[in-house]
Each structure stands twice: as structure tokens, then as C-alpha cells.
Amino acid sequence: MTDLRLAAASSEAFDTVGRQGPDLVGLSLVDSYPGIDATDLWRTYLDVLAGGTPYEGETDYEESTAGFQYRSRYRLRVVRCQGGLVVSYARLDSAEREQQRLALMQSLGRMGWVDRDLVRGSIVWSEEVYSIFGRDPDQGPVPLEELAVHAEDEDRPVMEQAVRGLLKAGEPVDRTFRIRIPGQQVRHVRIVVETENDALGRPVRVHGLFQDLSAAKHAERQLLEHKRSVLAQQGQLAAERDLAARLQDTLLPVPQQQLRLAGLTVDVAYLPVQEGLRLGGDWYSAVELPDGNVLLVVGDVAGHGLDAVATMAQLRFTAKGMAITGSPLPEILANLNTLLMHTSGRHFHTATMIMAVYEPAASRLTWVRAGHPPPLLVRDGSARFLPAPAGILLGAAHDPRFEASIVELRPGDHLLLYTDGLIERPGESIDEGMARLADTAQAIDLAAPRLLDGLVSALVAPGDSGDDICVLHMTR
């Protein structure tokens, strides 16, 4: 049978029956500790002896000597050395284990305890309090009366008053103070202390805890700064949206209206994709010119938001101004293209549009386009799109060619100018959307007071449109 014999022992070594140091030398483990060869401890010894891999951990050991049962827990280290084993151990009784757990909890919670005997004048700090104050344990604890010396200037009077109330009247303290530790670092330390009083109510003992809340305060400051940043950003966005809304209200104050212009009845429908705020780049104009003709425009600037609205405003007012001067429509589009190509700013925009002038004396409509879907003409119950003249979108090329087209409007004709939000659907070609518009226009009641209401609701379900919608309907 395998056995091990104790060859040497330090003077501090002891066993469960009280033998110590030199008394242990020469003892056989199997003879001295019956049953040890059936324990995990024994197997650990043999494994280290055979394999050479050191062992370090905690183990329980129980034995019976002189009729008494002994059970202990040890922190153990076993290392092979010159054909034998070197065993070092520390006994861990329940109180020691509780102290270990308490120390771990204090370390994790950055919390330590303090105890002050006011009669004898003694004061004790736990190890964690020294860490919180950045103080060498060899310097000893700081007396409560001197604690305020370590506080920040603004907190010092309050701390002094709190300590006086505690020591003289037994008033408990639960406050957080800023403490400056060596290295000029400031920590937020919560101090919770109370007294034990004698029969006359005089404080005789102080006990409590110190807790470092610096990490929590830092997180709180970061959260507050983030909240302020979010609020500032929200305020900026709200201001921008308000500005864009007021600007567009000035440009398109009435989302739905009906006009009578030189013999034409013109209905307008404007539906923004952003409910409650008309912040898109779609726009229209329907005005009577000084010469008695009627200007009709539908346009669409790429994008949304303040920049799109600003670009739309440029195009709308410039187009109207040049139309009033009598400039030919292809020339107006060319000038608008130049305006977009040479406008400085952070964002570059393109735009599509249709511009038309109706001459009531000849019942003639002259129109031009810049990359925009063609008008839809409904005549005698049949719908067809007008042949599109040449013209690419504005802002796409430096020297584009624009041509004009002419159509005669007859009594009973219905003409629709619209933006692509009315016909475009995800995963569907533009031709499919235009065919759907033509079919719908032929099927609805053209004599309805608000033809556009039925047309739009038939084509676009609530919440389905991903773009703004602007439609002009005119009839003689």
C-alpha cells in the first residue's frame, strides 16, 4: 500500500488534533490519519506526485480521533519536489470564510465600514475605507473630527456641521460628499453613520459605512450630458421643421382648393407623406398672368426637408417671374436648369416639372416638361397621355434641350398634371403606374364636385404612399 511520511514541517504547521511543528515530523499519513487514503485529498497527493502538475484550491477534510469527529476546510497548495511533495495550507473556518465573503462584497460594492469608540478614543477602518480615501493603512484612520479636511471646499462646512451634530447630539448622517484624495482626484463618497448612546443619551460609539459613488456619479453625468445633447438636437430639428413648415405654408397655404382662371376650373390636391407637416419638394402654381393667359405648373424636387423646400421655393418663384415676362417656356426651363447647376450650397438637388400656359382665346395649351410624367387627357370617356416633348430633369446636365408641345382643349375635356407619388409603387414599373392612373380616370365620375378626392383615394390607400402627392385637375 502506498504511504507518505512527513519529512519536515514548519513551526506554524498543525493538524486537527493539535500536533504542531516538530511533533509532526516522521509521522506516517496513513497510520496517523486513518481513512485518509480514501479521501479526495489523498488522491490529490498521488496525482501531483505522479504527474508533476501543481494543485491549488480548497478542500474539506474529516477524520475521527479519540472518538471525536473533525471536519475542516483548507486552502491547499501541493507541489512535487525532489521525489516528494511540498504541501502548504491555511485553515478556513466558517468565520474566516465569512470574512472573505464580506471583504469581497465590500470590494465589489466599493464600500467599507468604520467603528469609533468615543469613550476609549479608538477608531477602526476596514481595508476598503483606506482604498476609498487613497490612504496607506500604516497611516491609520482619519479621526471623524478631521474628516472635513479632506472634503472639497464647497462641501467642507456641511461636513463639519454633520460631524458636530453626530458627536454631540447623536444625529445620524447619510450624505454624499466630495472627497479629494492624493493625486488631486475627487471622489463622491456616501457617508452613513450613527451612534450608540449611554443611559443619558450621550453618544459613546459611532459605527457606519463609507461608499465610493464616483462611478455612479460619472455615469449619471454622462447620462445627463447625453440627455442634454438629445434635447438640443430635438430642439434644432423641431426648429428646422417649424421653419420648413412655415416656409411651405407661405408657398402652398391651401392643400386643397378650387380656382376659376380664364374659363378653366382648376382643382388642386396636395398630400404630404409626412402627416401634419408639408415638408416635401412637390409644388404647384395655378395663376392668371397679366396678359390674361393661365400659368399651370407641377414640380417635384428630389428629397424632403428644409433644403428641398428651399429649392422648391427658388424654382417656383423664378418660374412664375419669368412666365410673367412672357419668356418662352423652353427658355424658362433652360434658365431654371442653369439656376440649379450653379446654385451653391451644401446639398445638390435635381427636380422634375411640367409647365403649361393656357390661352383662353384659342383654347390652346402649350406645355413643356423636364423629366416629368406627361399630362393625362380624358376626352369623351377615353384617357390618354399626351405625347411627351424632349426634356430631361433639371440639374442633370449643363446644356439640355427642351421642346414645347401644344394641345387644344375642348369643352368637357379633363386634364391632369401630377407628381410621381400618385403612380409609383415599390417593385412596380412606371408604365404600370401610369396605366393604373388612366384606367382609374376613365372609371370615376367626372361630374363629381371633387373629382380629385375619388381619384386619389382610388389610387393610394391611406399610409401606402412613400412620397408626396400633388395633382392639378383642369376642365373647361
Image (cartoon, rainbow, N blue to C red):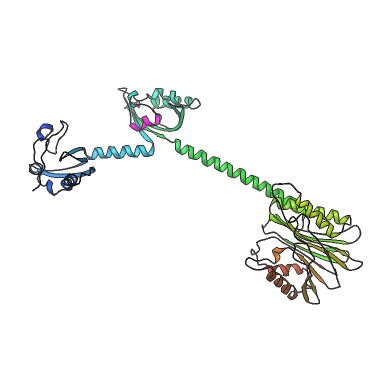
Which residue is drawn at the image coordinates 88% and 58% (left, top)? 289
Q: How many labels were placed on the picture?
A: 0
The residue closer to the viewer here, 372 or 402, is 402
Q: Nearer the viewer, residue 324 or 206?
A: 324
Q: Position of residue 170 (x, y in %)?
A: 38, 28
Report the residue at 75% width, 75% height from top: 442
Residue at 68% across / 47% down in the picture? 240
| Residue placed most toward the observer, 273 or 348 | 348
**Relative vertical location of residue 255 with respect to residue 177 in this rendering, above or below:** below
Q: Is residue 212 visible?
A: yes
The reply to whether residue 257 is in sight is no
Q: Residue at x 70, y 60 (%)?
A: 468
Q: Relative to 321, is 111 above or below?
A: above
Pick the front one: 57 or 66: 57
Q: How far from the left and from the top, in percent, is residue 128?
A: 35, 33
Q: Is residue 461 left or right of residue 145?
A: right
Residue range highlighted in magenta: 124-136
Q: What is the x, y in percent for residue 255? A: 75, 59
Q: Quadrant of the rendered structure where residue 104 is?
A: top left
Residue sitting farthest toward the front: 399
